Every structure is written in C-alpha cells, then in structure tokens.
C-alpha cells in the first residue's frame, strides 16, 4: 500500500470539473484527504482563474498505473495532451508524490518538480501534510512553504467545498 498526493487544477468550467474529478477519485480511492481549495491567477498565459487543491489517498496501484489512471480521468473531462504547457485546461491531475519514491520513467517524474516552484501546488500540499518531507530536499512541506517566495503567484480561498457523494 502506498500513499499518493495529487494536485488538481482547472480553469475551464472549473468548479464542475473539480467536483467531478473529486467524485471520480473518491469512487476509486476513498477515503480522500483534501487541502483547502484555492483560486489562483493563470501562470504563463492570460486566462480565467484556476481552482487548485491537493488530495492524498492510499492505493495499491503502482505509480505508473496511477499516472495512467489520472490521465484517463483528465481525458474523460476533455483534456487533450500535447498542447501548450501553459494553457487553459478543463482538468489537470498531477501525481506529485508517491510515498518517498524518486522515479523518472515513461513521462512520470517523482517527486514532481512543480512542488518547489508553484504556490498553487506547494501551499495546498503544505496545508494538507505539513510534516511530510520532500524526498530530495528532506525538508518538510511546512518549512518549504514558509521559505517560499510566492512573488506574483497570488492564491486566495475559493470558498468552494466538496463533500463525498452519499452512497445508498
């Protein structure tokens, strides 16, 4: 059993796509631990604001299989791969960490470099698991966030909440 941390982002029909992605992840990986959901300005292009959060869950799936499953959820939400790195998107699901593994294979890099570069990844991750240690730096997420220079990267609470669907 491994623990996975996933970043979720959307700026096209963002609230509906984030809710739907959380429902899909919950259906397969419940229970989910969620960070607060933040709103952030688009980075690298002009566009609508993003909704961003991080979720964590336990899974028996290996990282590459989980990575493929995340891509399938993105595709089901209209995500087309191969476009510009910084562009509007209906859904972005990134495997940030899988336990303390360091891996580079088949388009998957663990830990994901964005953890150290983007407030919309690091802040929710640090709030969700402040004592979690980065596999390469050894620093806690709380310490990384405390030292992070967010500069132009503004984040603010979205006010959005998600509750797991009730099973009957």
Image (cartoon, rainbow, N blue to C red):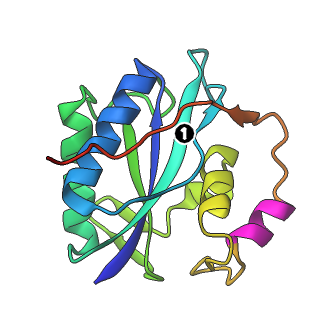
Residue 45 point in image, percent of width and height: 60, 21
Q: Main secondary structure of the magenta part?
A: helix
Residue 23 occupies which quadrant of the picture?
top left
- Helix, strand or loop status at disc 1: strand
Q: Is residue 130 left or right of residue 68?
A: right
Q: Where does the magenta region start and end?
A: 141-147
Q: Is residue 88 left or right of residue 124?
A: left
Residue 43 occupies which quadrant of the picture?
top right
Q: Residue at x 85, y 40 (%)?
A: 151
Q: Is residue 106 left or right of residue 11?
A: left
Q: Residue at x 47, y 24 (%)?
A: 87
- Which quadrant of the figure contains the N terminus? bottom left
Residue occupied by mark 1: 52
Let me know if residue 106 is in the magenta part.
no
Q: Residue at x 61, y 26 (%)?
A: 42
**Residue most toward the left?**
168
Q: Is residue 81 left or right of residue 147?
A: left
Within 10 Å of disc 1 (Cα), the crowding (few <14, some 14-19, many 20+) is many
Q: Residue at x 26, y 29 (%)?
A: 80
Look at the picture and state if 64 lies above or below 122. Answer: below
Q: Nearer the viewer, residue 1 or 136?
A: 1
């Amino acid at each position: 059993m491994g623990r996975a941390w996933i970043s979720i982002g959307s700026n096209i029909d963002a609230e509906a796509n984030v809710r739907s992605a959380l429902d899909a992840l919950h259906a397969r990986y419940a229970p989910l631990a969620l960070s607060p959901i933040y709103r952030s300005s688009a980075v690298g292009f002009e566009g609508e604001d993003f909704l961003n959060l991080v979720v964590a869950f336990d899974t028996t799936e290996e990282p590459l299989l989980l990575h493929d499953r995340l891509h399938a959820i993105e595709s089901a939400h209209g995500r087309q791969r191969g476009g510009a790195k910084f562009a509007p998107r209906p859904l972005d699901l990134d495997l940030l960490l899988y336990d303390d593994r360091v891996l580079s294979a088949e388009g998957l890099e663990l830990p994901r470099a964005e953890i150290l570069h983007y407030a919309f990844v690091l802040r929710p991750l640090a709030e969700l698991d402040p004592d979690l240690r980065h596999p390469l730096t050894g620093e806690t997420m709380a310490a990384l966030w405390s030292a992070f220079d967010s500069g132009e990267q503004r984040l603010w609470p979205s006010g959005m909440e998600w509750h797991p669907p009730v099973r009957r």
